[in-house]
Amino acid sequence: MLTIKILGSGCANCKRLEQIARKVVEETGAQAEVIKVTEYPDIMAYGITSTPGLVINEKIMSYGRIPTPAEVSTWVTDAIQTA
């Protein structure tokens, strides 16, 4: 099972990224847990400088922008294949 983390305080961009991630998981049929990380010290532990951040299986995939659904889908598919 994949672990997908959305790093952010809950701003509009963070919520949008969470929606994209959940939709991709649903569309791909991936077995994944989507977790929101909202505590600032927990976010900073990843070393990112701006939110939202997307982490798949503890690997930072993006931060500071909202990736496209196609990008997230590719990352999820790649993570499934390498898991």
Image (cartoon, grey):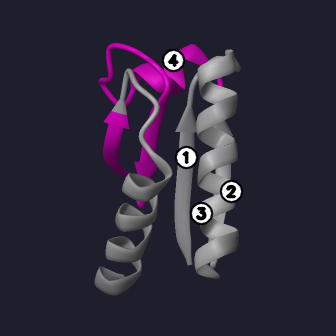
User: Residue 10 location in percent, x, y?
Assistant: 70, 20
Of badges 3 and 4, the one in the foreground is: 3
Residue highlighted by disc 4: 41
Q: CA distance from mark 1 to mark 3?
A: 13 Å
Identify the mark nearer the N-term, 4 or 2.
2
Q: Secondary structure at mark 4?
A: helix
Q: CA distance from mark 2 to mark 1?
A: 11 Å
Residue highlighted by disc 2: 22
Q: Secondary structure at mark 3?
A: helix
Residue highlighted by disc 1: 5
- Res 24 label: 3
User: Residues in magenta?
Assistant: 38-62
User: Residue 49 location in percent, x, y?
Assistant: 32, 14
The front one of 68 and 64 is 68
Query: Disc 4 residue type?
Result: Pro
Query: Disc 2 residue type?
Result: Arg
